[in-house]
Each structure stands twice: as structure tokens, then as C-alpha cells.
Image (cartoon, rainbow, N blue to C red):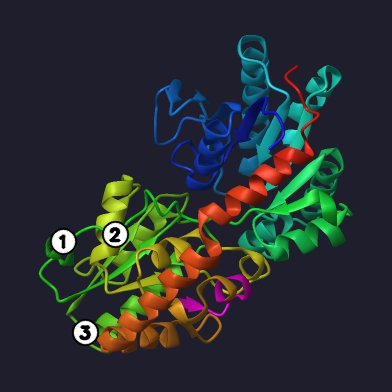
Amino acid sequence: MASAGKVLILVENLSVPFDRRVWQEARTLAANGWRVSVICPRMVDRRPFDLFEGVAIYRYWLPFTARRAPGYLIEYPWAMFMSFLYACWVFARRGFGVIHACNPPDLFFLVAWPFKLFGVKFLFDQHDLCPETFLSKFENRGRVLLRWLHRLEKCTYRAAKAVIATNESYKRVAVERGRVPAERVFVVRSAPDLSRFVPTTPNPALKKGKTRLVAYLGTMGQQDGVDYLLRSIRVIRHEWKRTDIQFTLMGGGENLASMRRLTTDLDLDDVVEFTGRVPNETVCETLSTADVCVAPDPVNPLNDKSTMNKILEYMAMSRPIVSYRLAESVFSAGEAAVYAADNDETDFARKITDLLDDPARRERMGRAGFARLKSELSWEHSTRHLLACYDSLSSAEPG
């Protein structure tokens, strides 16, 4: 690897180290000689500063998190302003030669612009396709805003010396829509660290007196399909009268409160538990106890191109998965998942109960998923691509 320097990582939609992908990237860079600083909002962890595993984490106050399109006109300008102020502070105190920006939003090029005067390079780590995210949340509303999202994405691509994509679908977007030369786009897949994310002894108490446990892990936003899952559970519980299954949903997000209300409205409080955001130890214990794990992300323009971290985390625990047939989910999970008909909640419910009633099949699927993850998709493979991307920026020395 080329000589390491100093890097500033910017992230807005989740705090670090709770953002698993960002934290893995930060730790990997630090372990390979980079002096890493991170700026993010205070969400899960309220402390304004941490120095953790060699990574300096600066957290700013984010007073408002948008739930509707107009709200982003408040949230994002504040976040960019605070990111810039903190970046000035970090530049003066620790220095950096690379700004590694993790979207959403596609606005971090504005934060990076002034630092280009000091030779700082801008690296775009595209976690989401913002125009497709907007369409999945708001459908055809706000065409003017949608056009601006395409323009901001284009500006971000143009500003970047290199682009990190989470999968081949995102790379195609960067090359074809963003006009980024293919040799400047590096695929760094999200994947759990198998040295840390490991199975534990199952805890039967998590089943709440029932014989089966179905687990969900992930963000609960508009595009994540938790409402689809809850309506599938309603079919299982009230139409098919299954009382032997406990459903545990781990994670936070903008729709968590509304999903809790929907659970009550559907009369599912006796079989559904929301844990909120929980520590890694709880995640591992719950997934190790689960009989089936679910990825209810519906088929739409965003999800079909996106790699779902939850699927890879389920595979790390050797769990069988129920998912809709999304292109990147099929690529990741392969034979570790069964796939329901597009956005069909009843078929999703049927796939869950069929797996629960077939322990031998669950065992085969779990083994196949772990083998695929370890041999082809683990973070060890992604590390090589991440470091190759930074090698391409080897001329970026601290400002």
C-alpha cells in the first residue's frame, strides 16, 4: 500500500460507531496506518467526542431529523454547516489530506470545496442512490426537487477523485449516469467482520414462551418494508391463527414510532417486540436464537440496486432468510434465502411459516449462506478494494 496520510470521514444519517459500514472502513484505514477522524451527528451516542480504537470521532448536535420532503430543507443545511465548522476545527487540530464523504445527502462536496485550496482530495462513498431514495419515499411528488437531486449527485461525482460503490449496480450508475471512468470506481461491499460478528449461545428466553423466533435487524425507514412485514405477521397471527411464533424487530429509524402504532392497530402486540437500537452483543444473541430472519424491503427502483446489510449479517449467523426478489439481495444471499413474490405480503408470510416448519431446510440454507459469505463476501475481501481505492489517492498528503 502507498504511504498512508490523514483522512476525514463525513457521515450524516447515522452516528459512528453505530454505522457499521463507516466504522469498519474507519477501523480498516486506522489499522493500515491512516490517521482517521470522523464527523457525524449525535444520535445513539450523545458524547461530543471519542477516541476509540485509534479513530477520533467528533459528533455535532442535530436538532431535527426530517420525516417529510420539506424537512430535509432544514435538516441538511444545518448538518452541512456543522460538518464544515467541525471540519475546520479538525483540519487545524489534526489535519487531513482526504475527505471521505458518505452519502446521503449528496451535499458533502460543498463542505469539501474550500479544502481543495489546500490540496485535499474528495472521495465519494455512495451508500445510497438519492434520486431513487426520494422516489421510493415520495413516488412522483416533488419533481423539481427530484431534478435537483440528480444535479447534486452529478456535482458530487464530478468533484470526486474516486468513487466507492457498495455493489456492481451502484458502480454502473456511477459510470453510466455519473460519467465517472470505470477505473476510478471501486466496489467495496458492506459485510460483517467475521472476527467480531460471531454466533453466541442461543437464549430461549428471547422467544417469550413461544417455540419459534423470527428476527429483523435494520433501519426502519419508509423504504425498509417494516410495514410489509407487520402486515405479513397479521396474516400469520390472525388469519392462520399461529400463536407459536415470536417476532423481534431490532433497529431504529424515522418510522420506528409509526411502526409501533401500526403493530397496535393490527393487534400484534402479543407477538411483536421492538427493541430499538441495541448493542452488538444483543444483536448476535438474538440472531443466534432466531429460527428465521427476514428482509422485507419491497421491490422498488432503490432497493433493487441496493445491498441490504441485514442479509449479510444474517448469513454471518448461519440463519435462513426470507426476502423479496431484489437483484442485489439475490446476488448476496443466493441459496441462503427464499424469495417471495414481489411485494406480496401473504406470500412473504407463507415463506416464513414454510421455513419454520422445515428445520432440515433451515439448516442447509444457513450453512450455505455462511459458506458463501466467508468465501466471497466477507469484509476481508472488501478491505482489499478499500485500500486499492486509497492507493489511487496516494498523492493526497495531509494539508
Please give the range of residues in magenta. Answer: 323-330
Question: Mark 3: which amino acid?
Answer: Arg
The answer to which image quadrant residue 199 occupies is bottom left
Between residues 6 and 208, which one lies in front from this camera angle? 6
Where is residue 338? Give x, y as percent. 45, 83
Residue at the image point whose x is 40% and y is 27% from the top = 46
Q: Determine which residue is flagged by label 3.
A: 242
Q: CA distance from mark 2 to mark 3?
A: 28 Å
Label 3 environment density (alpha carbons within 10 Å; few <14, some 14–19, many ≥20)? some
The answer to which image quadrant residue 347 occupies is bottom left
Q: Determine which residue is flagged by label 2.
A: 199
Label 2 sits on a secondary structure element that is: loop
Q: Comparing marks 3 and 1, which lies closer to the viewer?
A: 1
Question: Mark 1: which amino acid?
Answer: Asn
| Magenta span includes 16 | no
Label 3 sits on a secondary structure element that is: loop
Q: Comparing marks 2 and 3, which lies closer to the viewer?
A: 2
Where is residue 147? Give x, y as percent. 83, 53
Q: Is residue 177 visible?
A: no
Question: Mark 2: which amino acid?
Answer: Pro
In the picture as drawn, the residue positioned furthest to the top comes out as: 92
Label 1 sits on a secondary structure element that is: loop
Residue at the image point whose x is 24% and y is 57% from the top = 200
Q: Determine which residue is flagged by label 1.
A: 203
Mark 3 and mark 1 lie on one chain; the one further toward the N terminus is 1
Determine whether label 2 and label 3 are within 8 Å by CB: no
Mark 2 and mark 3 lie on one chain; the one further toward the N terminus is 2
